[in-house]
Every structure is written in structure tokens, then in C-alpha cells.
Amino acid sequence: MKIVIDTHILLWWVTDDKRLSHKARRLIESTQNKIIVSAASFWEIAIKQTLGRIKIDVAELEEAITIDDFEPLPIKLLHTVQVAGLPLHHNDPFDRMLIAQCLCETAHLLTHDEALSSYGKVVMVI
């Protein structure tokens, strides 16, 4: 299964945060799943890091996802077109991009944000 991990899930994974559930860990660790990290997540992290909301080295984060063999996903024009057609269940532009990417790439979004479940079966809330 192709799984795009939400930004907070990525951060919890790389920092070994206790908020990451055992179920999420199993999904990420399973060799049956392809774990995907969107450029939108890196963009969001870079903005929050610049604003002083989080302390993380984006270059080290990039190295960590390479070591973990996560697949990077660029933002494509097709993804932006998909965003335009999404219902406004959620206002966060980064989350909306992740949903659009999952729809376009036939993937699931792994998140802890229950508000995203209104987008249907594409979302896996853990």
C-alpha cells in the first residue's frame, strides 16, 4: 500500500515521539507499504522552523527520510488542479495538498488529524 505520511507523523517518526501509535509504527515499518513524504510537508516544516515554532534541521530531516527509504513526492501541477476541486472540509493548505496528492497518486494519508477523515477512505486516522 502507498502511504503518504502527514507532517506531524513524519516529525513524530524521526523524533521517536511517544504520540506516534504502535499501529502507525507498524504501518511505517512494514515492507509491504511504500512510505511517501510530500514536498508539501517539507515546505510546512521549513516555514515553521523559520518562524521558530519548531526546531529541526531540514537537511538532517531529508537525510533521515533517505536512510529510512521513504519516497519523496514533489508537488505536481496535477496535484494543484485536484486541490481546486476538493470540498472545503479543511482549511489548512498543506493538508489539502496532501489529500490531493493521495487522490492523484492512489495513496492513503496517514494522519492523527480526525478532521481530515471527512475526505473519506483516502484518509487513515491513527
Image: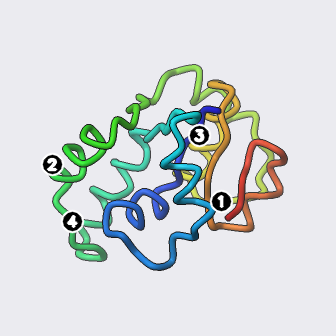
Which label number is shown at residue 56?
4
Looking at the rendered structure, the kind of residue marked 3 is: Ile
Q: Give the mark nearer the N terminus: 1 vs 3.
A: 3
The label on residue 59 is 2
| Point 75% across, 42% down: residue | 122
3 or 2: mark nearer the eye: 3
Give the Cα separation between the discs numbered 1 and 4.
Answer: 25 Å
The mark that comes first in sequence, 4 or 3, is: 3
Disc 3 on helix, strand or loop? strand
* Mark in front: 4 vs 3: 3
Above or below residue 39? Residue 94 is below
Label 1 sits on what residue type?
Asn
Between marks 1 and 3, how big is the CA–CA gap?
22 Å
Left or right: 32 as drawn, with respect to 117: left
Q: In this view, does 103 lie above or below 37?
A: above
* Residue type at the position of mark 4: Ile
Give neighbour class at mark 4: few <14, some 14-19, many 20+ (Cα, 10 Å): some
Q: How far apart are marks 3 and 2 (CA)?
A: 22 Å
Image quadrant in which the C terminus is located: bottom right
Q: Nearer the viewer, mark 2 or mark 1?
A: 2
Identify residue for label 3. Answer: 3
Determine the secondary structure under disc 4: loop
